[in-house]
Image (cartoon, helix red, strand yellow):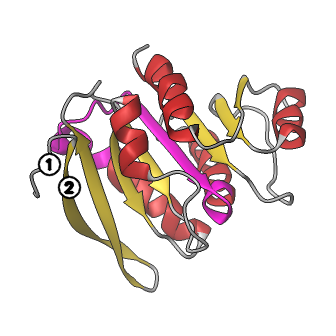
Amino acid sequence: MANNPAHHTAQLALRGSAGRLWSDLHRPAEGSGALLVYLSDPAGPLVEPAALGTHAGLMVLVSRPTTPHDAIDVVEWAAEHAAELDADPDRLLVGGEHRGAAFTAAVARQARDDGWPDLLRQVLVAPPPATEACGGTAPATVVGDPGYAQRLRQAGVAVEEVAGGTDLPVRLGAALRLHAAR
């Protein structure tokens, strides 16, 4: 792991359907023990996951899956190995932006359908308009799409909205810190 006053980083190779899924594990200097699996989008981040982890006090596993199945595999791996990563397996969050947000929603639906893994929260940053909103999934934090947040609420999901902007990592981090501490 590289040393940095704000966090430590390690690179992991996880198995995906089309080969290795290179993932980065960011461990903040001070954390809550919660683990956020962040499904990145190749279009570029709106939120820098390492900075989000630092502001939220969360360990963040950043992965770049290309299919919903790979995203589900990454989250299931994280749930199975959370204790080995020094994370609390009962405090697992999943999030992503753009296509990663659509994958996050797919993971939340799969977790609901299978009854595992237990997700503390789903974090959806700029979800694509076609992202399916489903009832019975983990509570959500939504950034950038009030219509999607409303569809989730109508489906019975508890939703918190965070407005976008230049200080998004700080505001989103503060919101997630509160949820992860519960």
In the image, is 29 to the left or to the right of 179? left
* Residue behind mark 1: 4
Position of residue 69 in the picture relative to residue 137 (left or right): left
Query: Would residue 154 be found to the left or right of residue 96 on screen?
Result: right
Question: Measured from the top left, where is residue 68 in percent x and y?
Answer: 60, 66
| Residue 154 location (% of width, % of height) | 90, 29
Q: Is residue 116 visible?
A: no
Q: Which segment did they paint magenta?
A: 79-101
Whether residue 111 is visible here, answered yes or no, is: yes
Q: How many marks?
A: 2
User: Mark 1, residues whose alpha carbon is within 10 Å: few (<14), some, or many (≥20)?
Assistant: few
Q: Measuring 28% from the left and 30% from the top, which residue is drawn there?
A: 88
Which residue is outermost to the bottom? 18
Neighbour tally class for label 2: few under 14, some 14-19, many 20 plus, Cα within 10 Å: some
Q: Residue at x 59, y 40 (%)?
A: 123
The label number, if any, that marks residue 176 in the structure image: none
Q: Quadrant of the C terminus?
A: top left
- Horizontally, is 11 left or right of 148 in the view? left
Q: Check disc 2 and give the amino acid type.
A: Thr
Q: Would you say residue 95 sits in the magenta stretch?
A: yes
Please identify, in this view, whether the residue under mark 1 or under mark 2 is nearer the observer: 1
Q: Secondary structure at mark 2?
A: strand
* Residue 27 among magenta residues: no
**Residue furthest out toward the top:** 182
Badge 1 vs badge 2, beta-carbon distance below 8 Å: yes
Q: Is residue 117 above or below residue 106?
A: above
Residue at screen point 81% across, 44% down? 145
Q: Nearer the viewer, residue 174 or 85?
A: 174
Numbered circle sitting on residue 9 = 2
